[in-house]
Image: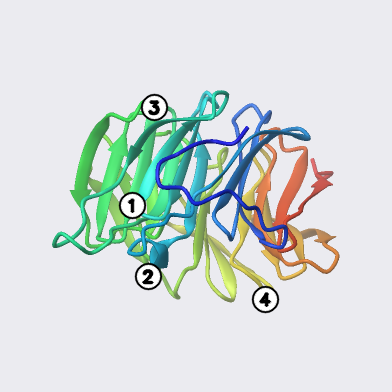
Amino acid sequence: MQVSLPLLAPRTINRRAGINHLAYSPDGSLLALSDTHMCVEVRRGDETVFSVKLATYDQKVRPTERIRGLSFTHDGKLLLIAAGDKVSAIDVERGELRWDYRPPRSFGFLIVSPIALATSLGHVAAAFDNGSFAIWSEDGVMRALWHENDCPRYMAFLPDGDRLVGCDSFSLGVWNVQTRKREYRIKLPDRVYSLTVSPGHNTVAARTLHEVLLYDGDEGKLVSRLPIGAGLPLAAFHPTESVLALGDKFGVNLVTYDGTFLERLNTSDASVLSLTFTPDGEKVVAGLSDRTVQSWPFLHR
């Protein structure tokens, strides 16, 4: 199914465009992926449920065109997309736009774009490049909008679903989405290029160019430092085990939280652009630069 959204360019999927985001629905039945040419596709097994290209004809928006985040709501019925100058929620089964938010332009003409996206039970959160935070209900009702000096470039909900951890590249902070108050802020030892949260252990991974820093999500204490290889700053937590998948240019390393090496998973000649686990933890899944998805069984229980 092809989705019809306002201001979309004609859908032309470039088979050489790499897959830069992967997101599973909570029950694992759906896989959403996006590529570097602004295409989004949702699959159920080998079936394409819907696909859409989010490129726009608006010449003012085009320089900001990039898909910054994909995430399903807790029931898997909506796919949230942060791309270009707005956040959109698409009904997965009908392939219809349910709601969207395009922030007002600064000074009436400067484009404001979402740079980070996160969802939890009942909450949708986005951060924007003008330093603003927005929180919505899953049906698109805005609950809060405020500005932060340390507005994050990368963020995710902690397992309790009411606290949001974010990183502006140089500091790590945790906000309570009910009160909009920041619980703590810590300065990072080096610039960070990605952030992810363990769904089962309340552990935060912040990845620099040379290592992964693991922090306790409650207190912000440094747990361990893990060395990494060259490649994009990709990291993914196993949903239940104390295992972290770390991507590098041509593969994935599985390590424990204390840095014990478990396994090397190699790709062919394609680079790893995105990385995740299936929700049941049975597979490691990577999106590659040749627009393929490769998976490996997880054997370390």
Q: Mark 1 points at which residue?
A: 127
Question: Distance between the Cα atoms at labels 4 and 2?
Answer: 20 Å
Q: Check disc 2 and give the amino acid type.
A: Phe
What is the tally of numbered marks visible in this picture?
A: 4
Residue in the picture at 67% in, 44% down: 238
Question: Distance between the Cα atoms at labels 1 and 3?
Answer: 17 Å
- Colour convention of the picture: rainbow
| Numbered badge on residue 284 | none
Q: Which of marks 3 and 2 is in front?
A: 3
Q: Check disc 1 and give the amino acid type.
A: Ala
Point out the tag, 3 or 4, that comes first from the N-terminus: 3
Q: Is residue 258 visible?
A: no
Instruction: Mark 1: give few (<14), some (14-19) or many (20+) Cα within 10 Å.
Output: many
Point out the tag, 3 or 2, that comes first from the N-terminus: 3
Q: Name the residue under label 4.
A: 230
Query: In terms of secondary structure, where does tag 2 sit?
Result: loop
Q: Check disc 4 and give the amino acid type.
A: Ala
Query: In terms of secondary structure, where does tag 1 sit?
Result: strand
**Is there a contact, CB below 8 Å, between mark 4 and mark 1?**
no
Q: Is residue 240 left or right of residue 209?
A: right
Q: Nearer the viewer, residue 174 or 287?
A: 287
Q: Quadrant where the C terminus lies?
A: top right
Q: Position of residue 183 (x, y in %)?
A: 28, 48
Question: Distance between the Cα atoms at labels 2 and 1?
Answer: 16 Å
Q: Mark 2 points at which residue?
A: 170
Q: In this view, does 51 lie to the left or right of 168?
A: right
Query: In terms of secondary structure, where does tag 4 sit?
Result: loop
Q: Quadrant where the N terminus lies?
A: top right
Question: Distance between the Cα atoms at labels 3 and 2?
Answer: 29 Å
